[in-house]
Image (tube, grey):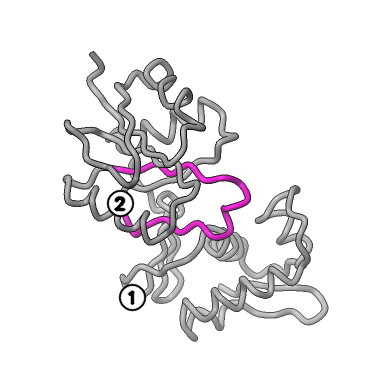
Amino acid sequence: MSEKSALFMARTTRFHEFARSLTTTLGVEVSLATPDSPTAAHDFDLLILDSDGIRSDRIDQIAKWLDDRGGVPMLVIVDDEALGTLRLPNHAHADFVCPTATPNELKARAQRLMGEEETVTADDVLNIDNLEINLATYQVTLDNEPIDLTLMEYSLLSFLATHPNRAYSREVLLHRVWGFEYCGGTRTVDVHIRRIRSKVGPQIAAHITTVRGVGYLFKD
């Protein structure tokens, strides 16, 4: 019997074989459940949630349910095309992984969430005025209050903030943040910048400078 156990929750059976394989790859006992019937008969150390077909508000409810169970960590499986709208709950132990992740990546993320604590170093935390970006946990706070950013909003903000005082074109930002596979137009960068500015407030928004004819620059 494994010392650790995981609950795999999904609306479909598309990853059931994958879930069962975790007994071997992670050395954990795996049970199956659905988001509509989440009750587990026993305690578990990790929830692995396939987010396909699950609304973001339902994911928030599941996160609260985990908090009531003592703060069980959650690893969310999200399809590549849904990354732009993914919102990880403001949950101390939540992470995401794509279905295309290697077994080693999945193992590393799951082990980290299951209590093999990593020390968050000063290099993992970026402070700009009253904004804090935790690069280890993907969390952003403003005046110690969490900001609700999508994954792509977080990725764009953190990229610019960790590469200050250098102008990046929209094309380069699409390549560096969205990746090779993104097929949309550069206008999406402007849309995400506008959303970020509205969420971080005027003081932080002033750091994000539009460089006419080029793109954007983050002033430190």
| Quadrant (top left/top right/bottom left/bottom right) for the N terminus | top left
Judging depth in this view, the residue of 12 and 173 nearest the camera is 12
The question of residue 91 being in magenta is answered with yes
N-term-proximal mark, 1 vs 2 = 2
Residue ID for mark 1? 143
* Residue at 51% across, 32% down: 14
The location of residue 199, given as percent across then percent down, is 47, 77
Q: Which quarter of the picture shows residue 183?
A: bottom right
The location of residue 202, given as percent across then percent down, is 49, 86
Judging depth in this view, the residue of 57 and 144 nearest the camera is 57
* Residue at 29% across, 21% down: 29
What residue occupies the far bottom of the structure in this picture? 202
Q: Amino acid at mark 1?
A: Asp
Judging depth in this view, the residue of 36 and 114 nearest the camera is 36
The CA distance from mark 1 to mark 2 is: 26 Å
Q: Is residue 100 left or right of residue 128?
A: right
The range drawn in magenta is 73-92
Looking at the image, residue 177 lies above or below residue 109: below
Looking at the image, residue 72 lies above or below residue 17: below
Q: Say which mark, if any, is on residue 62.
A: 2
Is disc 1 surrounded by few (<14), some (14 to 19) or many (20+) residues within 10 Å? few
The kind of secondary structure element at disc 1 is loop
Do callouts 1 and 2 mark residues in contact (Cβ within 8 Å)? no
The kind of secondary structure element at disc 2 is helix
Look at discs 1 and 2 and give the one toward the viewer.
2
The location of residue 51, given as percent across then percent down, is 46, 47
